[in-house]
Amino acid sequence: MEDRHKTAGSASVVHRTASVLITFFLVLSGGFVASSPKAQETGGTAIVLRLEGAVSPATADYVTNGLEIAAEREARLVVLLIDTPGGLDTSMREIIRAILASSVPVASFVAPSGARAASAGAYILYASHVAAMAPGTNVGAATPIALGGGSPFGANPEEEQEAQDSAEEGGEDRGGRRQSPRNASEEKAINDAVAYIRGLAELRGRNAEWAERAVREAASLSSAAAAQQDVIDFTASSIDDLMRKADGLTVQVGQSQTVLETSGLVREAIDPDWRTRLLSVITDPNVALILMMIGIYGLIFEFLNPGTFIPGTIGGISLLLGLYALAVLPVSYAGVGLIILGAALVLAEAFAPSFGILGIGGAVAFVLGATILFDTEIPGLEIYWPVLGGIAIASLAFSLLVARLAMVAHRRTVATGAEQMIGARGKVDSWSNGSGYVLVHGERWKAVSAASLAAGTEIRVTGRDGLVLKVAALEPEHSASEEGRRKP
């Protein structure tokens, strides 16, 4: 009987331990496991992604990965929260391709209040299966930015911003003046953008005429006006409100028509992973410039002072990260050339001292290259003037430092090699018929001279031919002054 009680007690302990472990793993699993019963009850989940800030390679990587995760988890809906001033055309098209190829319906939601879907954001909104906006948001100003600055129509950026502000305040359709492109290249760019957004509008059954105006005239709309003009499907106050209003809508997913069942879905937010966060940091033009500066100057410092390894290691890593940013961002080749020229001039200062002229010229070239390296007109990817100012000061200081070190090095007496013998003083050890042996730096050298010298005569080395020194008698005044310096 006692054994039975022990057995029952042991079983109870094991049962309690198992219960604690199960509870522990449920807590560790977080919201995903906790939401499973509710997900089963309501019939699925809605993946929530956030598109905030400039549309960049990091943003595209995050959204495409999020859509893949949604497909793997068989989510019913992907809610893409949008608040962006625009960004890179290549990244925008990558996101749109992922949305069009997604097996899970995507509902783009411009939220919260005060958010906007400008420029690239407007294209993404048009490409989504469901388009919604929160009150107090705006969409539009989709005129593409030409590489090198300025819009293709030569429109004033301040006018475009006023158009967006007017849309936010009054809710009316406001746009800039329609102007002709300045050249054939700009005309091609604008026509391509118009065709692209009209194709998206026709695919989703939205207002294609206004979409063209958003491109050609940088027109903008408030959320209420966008709903009235069929630019979006509806307005919503929250994600839950969006899912309630989207429930029952028929959308085209791939080649088939799908009726959305989104009411009461369990939300699951997906945050960017470490790789996306790192990519987002290094593809910021300001960070990329700083990395390039650290990389170039670190390698130059290592080259001038070999053996320390720390500047070279940090410089090499920084330069590689900066070059990666250049590979994914639109850059001006003139800017790259100026940066390379600046680095070359700073390096040349170390070998051909010019009292700082080459170094200062290199600093100026580096700063000018940094100024025009990126297209500063792309929304959200601007170069900040304080960053340029800091780069200018650091470049000038480094150039002056290199010039100073080079001048000190050239003034220093050569201590090694054949050159260190030139100008050295010594005494004749033995001499006969224009040649003999001299003692210099405690060493006995064979020497020749045009003058007739006697043993003990003080000499100065004037040249060297292999292992034979060319010497001349030291003038008496030099000898006397030398003796005076030797006396205590």
Image: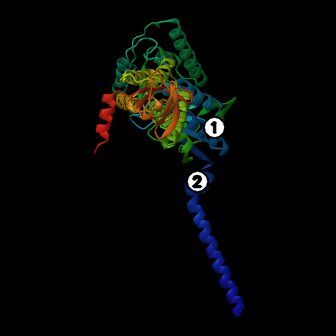
User: What is the C-alpha distance between the residues marked 1 and 2?
Assistant: 19 Å
In the image: residue 73, left or right of residue 275: right
Foreground: 290 or 160? 290
Q: Position of residue 126 (x, y in %)?
A: 54, 26
Q: Nearer the viewer, mark 1 or mark 2?
A: 2
In-image side of 24 versus 449 (left or right):
right
* Residue at 68% over, 30% down: 254
Q: Mark 1 or 2 closer to N-term?
A: 2
Whether pointer 1 and pointer 2 mark residues with C-beta atoms closer than 8 Å, the reply is no
Q: Quadrant of the C terminus?
A: top left
How many numbered marks appear? 2
Q: Farthest residue toward the bottom?
A: 1
Within the image, what quadrant is residue 36 found in?
Answer: bottom right
- The reply to whether residue 50 is visible in this rendering is no
Label 2 SS:
helix
Residue at coordinates 63% horizontally, 79% vertically from top-left?
A: 13
Q: Position of residue 341 (x, y in %)?
A: 47, 21
Q: Which mark is residue 32?
A: 2
Mark 1 burial class by Cα count in 10 Å: few <14, some 14-19, many 20+: many
- Please name the amino acid that badge 2 sits on: Phe
Q: Quadrant of residue 270?
A: top right
- Looking at the picture, does residue 282 appear above or below residue 165? below
Query: Residue 44 — which label?
Result: none
Secondary element at image label 1: loop
User: What amino acid is found at the position of numbered circle 1 in the picture?
Assistant: Val
**Residue 149 in sight from this viewpoint:** yes
Q: Check disc 1 and report the residue beneath it.
A: 104
- Residue in the foreground of this view, choosing between 8 and 289: 289
Q: Judge by depth and name the residue closer to the eye, 63 or 317.
A: 317
| Circle 2 crowding by C-alpha within 10 Å: few under 14, some 14–19, many from 20 | some
Residue drawn 62% across and 71% down?
19
Left/right of residue 487 with respect to residue 210 in the rendered view: left
